[in-house]
Image (cartoon, helix red, strand yellow):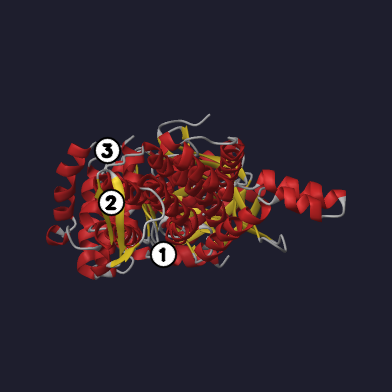
């Protein structure tokens, strides 16, 4: 039963694409389950072709899942009503170039069901917020990549969303613009808006997100709190099927613990601690999947995870 | 309602930006100007004295009433042939445009159903063409009315009839757009239907000429299945001339075709991944 304490909940979500003629199968997302709590900033990481965008599109019902289910605030994602409080900025967006900044914001906000008077009030406010105050009546065809990204963000914010799904939000934006976008997102985070970012800019995700999930070949490869995943140098011990009593004991000794697809990752700060853990696990006949030394950046965690 | 209006308004904006609206509007204006300035009619005591075309006098063989009906019929015939072709050609790009990657995802992320999105676009497209047809027919009707004092309301029925056939051809364009995202292919299929219509309408002649029974059945089947653009045109001209229609079969069978095709387009659009 989906709980509305989660802004996003995916249960065993899968998508298999079949080519039109040869019927060859491409498994883009493979049994992915994840939960994003309300009010968190969550980063979805993965190499190109890992299935990130397909996953996001399934949340928005642009792609139909082959199996599994997705929920937004406890409602099935396939229902249009579930998307009412969602703001979305797609990757490689193609806003109609015949629209001006103002008319584009007006159009998409109207589709979100916003009344005319509310739209009229909100548009200048947002254009100012994203630094495009003087560009509102200019056609989007004249905008630079960075400006399109900023007006795209304004579009996602028009109807006061409670969940923001941003696909590569700082793509094409200069460093000043990126900082500006980060400031806007930080202000939203403080207001309790859930922010879900799909990005390959690991430094930004590490700086901004509280939690991350790394997906590889359509599967969840690693997930957890950023501060746990980058909890200093040490050792990451991956174990399958740990008895509950032993798991509790090891959790007390570990710097961080995260679980995925039936396996548990324990992060230990020293060689002594990890050796002790191995002794305890082996005495209980537990299978050790892997043991890896860890460093302190999300990039290292990411590279290690996708190269496993 | 807000979303529907937004989708319709967006179609108008795109039609204006692509110069589609202005192209059709310009053509309609040209025809209205023709009737306004180039066709001069002199009436003496209610009867037609002279008709001047491009500044040259033409000896009127018909009476005034017949001349006006002839003009109405010519406009209706134009609308059913070249007008329809231009409308389809101009509109064909408007459906695949919303399906472009980077644009459709954003539309689908809004709390609007897929059916609503496609029907909103369809409605906007019908209204763009509807505005132009209304402008042309109403313009010619008013000008001829002012020049001759003959006001035949039956001519106005050609607005509804032309728009009806256009909306059926647009359903085909929508289906092709959803299936193949190709404006060119959508236009080609719609034009093939337009070309086939007068050929299939010769059912009684064809049945005499065809030797095998299955070929005759196939001909009849195709005739009843496909939209009857030619018959609708003839029916409209008949309505203009004497206010009556021989049969309403072309209307309901064409409507049925349009509903089925639009339904198929909606069903496919529902199932597609973007």
In primary-sequence order, the first of circles 2 and 1 is: 2
Q: What number is the disc on residue A200? A: 1
In primary-sequence order, the first of circles 3 and 1 is: 3
Quadrant for the C terminus of chain A in the image: bottom right
Do the residues bearing badges 2 and 3 touch, measured as CB atoms within 8 Å? no
Q: What number is the disc on residue B67? A: none
State the residue position of label 3: A114
Q: Is residue A212 visible?
A: no
Mark in the foreground, 2 or 1: 2
Q: Residue at x 13, y 58 (%)?
A: A133
- Which image quadrant is residue A96 in? bottom left
Q: Residue at x 44, y 40 (%)?
A: B116
Report in which chain the residue with disc 2 lies: A
Please state the horizontal and vertical placement of residue B43, each as a whole percent of the image: 26, 50
Position of B194 with respect to A269 (left or right) is right
State the residue position of label 2: A155
């Amino acid at each position: 039963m989906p709980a509305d304490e989660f802004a996003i909940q995916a249960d065993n979500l899968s998508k298999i694409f079949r080519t039109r003629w040869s019927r060859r199968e491409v498994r883009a997302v493979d049994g992915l389950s994840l939960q994003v709590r309300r009010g968190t900033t969550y980063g979805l990481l993965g190499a190109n072709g890992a299935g990130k965008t397909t996953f996001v599109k399934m949340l928005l019902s642009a792609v139909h899942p082959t199996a599994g289910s997705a929920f937004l605030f406890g409602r099935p994602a396939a229902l249009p009503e579930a998307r009412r409080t969602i703001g979305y900025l797609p990757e490689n967006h193609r806003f109609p170039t015949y629209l001006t900044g103002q008319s584009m914001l007006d159009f998409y906000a109207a589709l979100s069901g916003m009344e005319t008077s509310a739209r009229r009030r909100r548009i200048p406010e947002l254009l100012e917020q994203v630094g495009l105050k003087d560009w509102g009546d200019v056609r989007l065809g004249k905008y630079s990549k960075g400006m399109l990204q900023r007006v795209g963000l304004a579009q996602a914010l028009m109807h006061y969303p409670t969940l923001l799904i941003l696909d590569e939000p700082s793509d094409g934006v200069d460093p000043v613009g990126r900082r500006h976008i980060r400031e806007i997102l930080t202000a939203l985070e403080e207001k309790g808006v859930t922010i879900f970012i799909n990005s390959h800019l690991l430094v930004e995700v590490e700086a901004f997100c509280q939690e991350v999930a790394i997906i590889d070949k359509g599967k969840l490869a690693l997930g957890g709190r950023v501060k746990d995943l980058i909890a200093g140098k040490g050792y990451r011990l991956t174990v399958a099927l740990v008895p509950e009593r032993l798991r509790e004991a090891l959790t007390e000794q570990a710097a961080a613990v995260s679980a995925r697809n039936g396996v548990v990752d324990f992060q230990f700060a020293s060689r002594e601690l990890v050796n002790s853990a191995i002794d305890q696990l082996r005495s209980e006949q537990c299978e050790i999947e892997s043991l890896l030394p860890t460093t302190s950046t999300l990039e290292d965690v990411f590279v290690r995870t996708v190269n496993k | 309602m807000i979303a529907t209006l937004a989708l319709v308004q967006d179609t108008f904006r795109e039609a204006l930006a692509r110069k589609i609206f202005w192209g059709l509007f310009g053509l309609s204006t040209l025809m209205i100007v023709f009737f306004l300035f180039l066709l001069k009619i002199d009436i003496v005591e209610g009867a037609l004295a002279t008709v001047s075309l491009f500044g040259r006098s033409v000896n009127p063989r018909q009476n005034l009433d017949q001349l006006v009906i002839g003009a109405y019929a010519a406009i209706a015939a134009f609308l059913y042939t070249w007008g329809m072709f231009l409308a389809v050609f101009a509109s064909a790009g408007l459906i695949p445009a919303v399906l472009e990657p980077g644009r459709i995802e954003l539309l689908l992320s809004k709390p609007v159903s897929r059916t609503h999105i496609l029907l909103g676009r369809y409605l906007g497209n019908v209204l763009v063409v509807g505005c132009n047809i209304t402008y042309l027919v109403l313009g010619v009707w008013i000008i001829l009315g002012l020049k001759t004092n003959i006001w035949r309301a039956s001519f106005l029925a050609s607005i509804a009839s032309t728009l009806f056939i256009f909306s059926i051809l647009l359903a085909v364009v929508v289906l092709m757009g959803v299936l193949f995202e190709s404006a060119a292919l959508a236009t080609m299929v719609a034009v093939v239907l337009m070309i086939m219509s007068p050929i299939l309408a010769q059912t009684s002649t064809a049945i005499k000429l065809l030797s095998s029974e299955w070929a005759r059945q196939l001909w009849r089947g195709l005739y009843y299945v496909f939209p009857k653009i030619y018959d609708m045109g003839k029916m409209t001209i008949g309505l203009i001339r004497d206010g009556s229609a021989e049969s309403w079969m072309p209307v309901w069978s064409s409507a049925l075709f349009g509903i089925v095709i639009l339904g198929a387009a909606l069903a496919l659009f529902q199932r597609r991944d973007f």
